Amino acid sequence: TAPPDGPAPGTNFQRVEPNTLDAVVVPKGYEQAVVIRWGDPVLPGAPDFDFDNQTAAAQERQFGFNNDFAALLPIDHLGLAALLVTNHEYTTEEFMFRGYDEANPTEEQVRIAWAAHGLSVLLVTRNWNSGAYRPRTSGFNRRITARTPFVVAGPAAGSDLLKTPDDPTGTRVLGTLNNCAGGVTPWGTILSGEENFNQYFANADQVADPEVRARLARYGMSGTETGRKWERFDSRFDLTEQPNEANRFGWIIEVDPRDPRSSPIKHTALGRFKHEGATIRVADDGRVVAYSGDDEAFEYVYKFISSRKMKKGASRSARRHNMTLLDEGTLYVGRFTGDSPGEIDGSGTLPADGEFDGTGEWLPLASGDRSFVPGMTAEEVYVFTREAADRVGGTKMDRPEDIQPHPRTGRVYFALTKNSARGKEGFPAADEANPRTGNKHGQVVELEEERGNALATTFHWRLLLVCGDPNSPDTYFAGFPKDQVSPISSPDNVAFDHHGNLWVSTDSAGALGINDGLYAVPLEGSRRGDLKLFLTVPRGGETCGPVIGDKVVTVCVQHPGEVDGASADNPASNWPDGGDNRPRPSVVAVWKPGRHGLASIG
Ligand code: FEO
Ligand code: CA
Ligand code: CA
Ligand code: CA
């Protein structure tokens, strides 16, 4: 039975029942509104969205496809005006075009896809008595696409490994791709992770040099044509023409949303892999620490410690300095060691000491031009970071997703979304941090640096949540009574409210037969582990980019209607426009009306 006291502060809402509705479902007494949809105007002169007559010129000025990460940066003291920054992770052309011929996309369709990738920066405002943020035209508004010029910074900038015929300097890259999660830096910029960039590069199998081919394969590049066929319209996506172009993706990028003319940056010191995102914690001495996960089965968790210190204040010169902090420092990979040796059988049953937990180390990979990895130069460590982590013996995890330090306690929380291959024949066995064979539902890790010191190279960790159906014996909710909690599968993004509760959004709860959603879970006190479902998204959609404000929660609804067999000709969702409209990825705001303006979210 549950503890006798009421809900933890910030979680005082009536939990949403898991469902499969084609709607965003919020708790009783709460309201919601769509903030912006794919195709809505962002830049001046953008035409209204017209599904059947979309053009690349329109898309370049409109909100992109498949919004994933979102940040809201307040620009007034009341939070009524804010810059909304979103990632546009990827395109699914069969949902964007009626009668799409995947074997023969037109050049215009490809150019629309290029313009629908990247990021958007958009001014949004709301009234004091409503949470319904509305898009505004402003000088801040910006679209970054697959063709926007980026500056490469850090120790691998200018490396031969990054040089191409179009860029013999190895310092200028066109565009960003597959931006998944991200983070807001303490200096007010946005970090964003280039995740599954491999899918854009064709003909890896025909690359002549076997070493180059092996390195492409380590990042998932093999085969011939790509699904989108971009290589037919721009040779940089053909690895036989420009094998180094793929080395120019897979980085953490930084964007200054307050300076629409600034060049976005690719930070090579944070390594190259399928970055879910990156988030920052500031150490007591002012140096900054960045955490980042590599989202693929049996990949790693990384940490970076800067050599230089953050300048305080919001001035432009402080921001300019702070935007160089991620270019000089030391990159580490995580090794997780359980404290219950011999007891992990892959069933998910708790070990004898009652917790999946243990200790860990951050193993150094490179610092500036110094490599700590035998047989690899520093440049190779940054560009082929997975190979470096393999060589030093990092711990292969169950798909590291979003990773965020708690703003008050400094503890670090991250989602391991799932890994169906765990423990299967030919794959690594279950271990205490990844304790289930054929892990279908994922887990959430709580990590505490040694003595709470952000600069520590050793840590303690424990599993906060082992996700799934609470009725199943292989689930765990920080010891909270399981008959009280909501079911959850495939945790992806993590965020915090101002009470210090953790919020978790999911990607693929279909593994439990329910729609994805956003959950809140207290981390302290008698309600620790009391996981509550706050909202669900329409069928086929993923819940991401949660921003948990005091009065308004915003989430991204990514790929609504993306279910097997669906397409623009056979839509599985009509959200958000209803009728027989095609689904549109959108940002949604949720709030609770109060007597004087808005009530607190929970
Ligand atoms: Fe794009 Fe790792 O989820
Ligand atoms: Ca243990
Ligand atoms: Ca994600
Ligand atoms: Ca995911």
Image: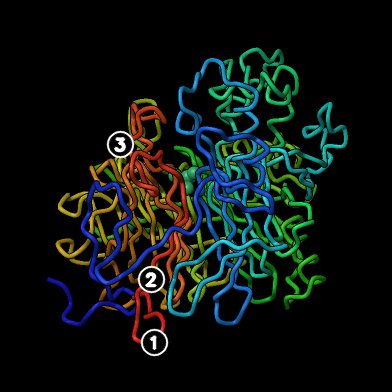
> Mark 1 = which residue?
596
Taking the spot 29% from the left edge, 47% from the top edge, the residue there is: 22
Quadrant of the rendered image holding ligand 4: top left
Q: Position of residue 306 (x, y in %)?
A: 71, 62
The amino acid type found where label 1 is placed reads His
Earlier in the chain: of badge 1 and badge 2, it is 2
Tell me where residue 357 appears, x and y as whole percent.
36, 58
User: Which comes before the other along the chain, label 1 or label 3?
Assistant: 3
Quarter of the rendering occupied by the C terminus: bottom left
Indicate the amino acid at tag 3.
Answer: Gly
Q: Secondary structure at mark 3?
A: loop
Residue 513 placement: quadrant = top left
Q: CA distance from mark 3 to mark 2?
A: 38 Å
Residue under label 3 = 438
Relative depth, front residue between 377 and 406: 406
Please tell me whether mark 2 sits on a helix, a strand or a loop.
strand
Closer to us: 14 or 215: 14
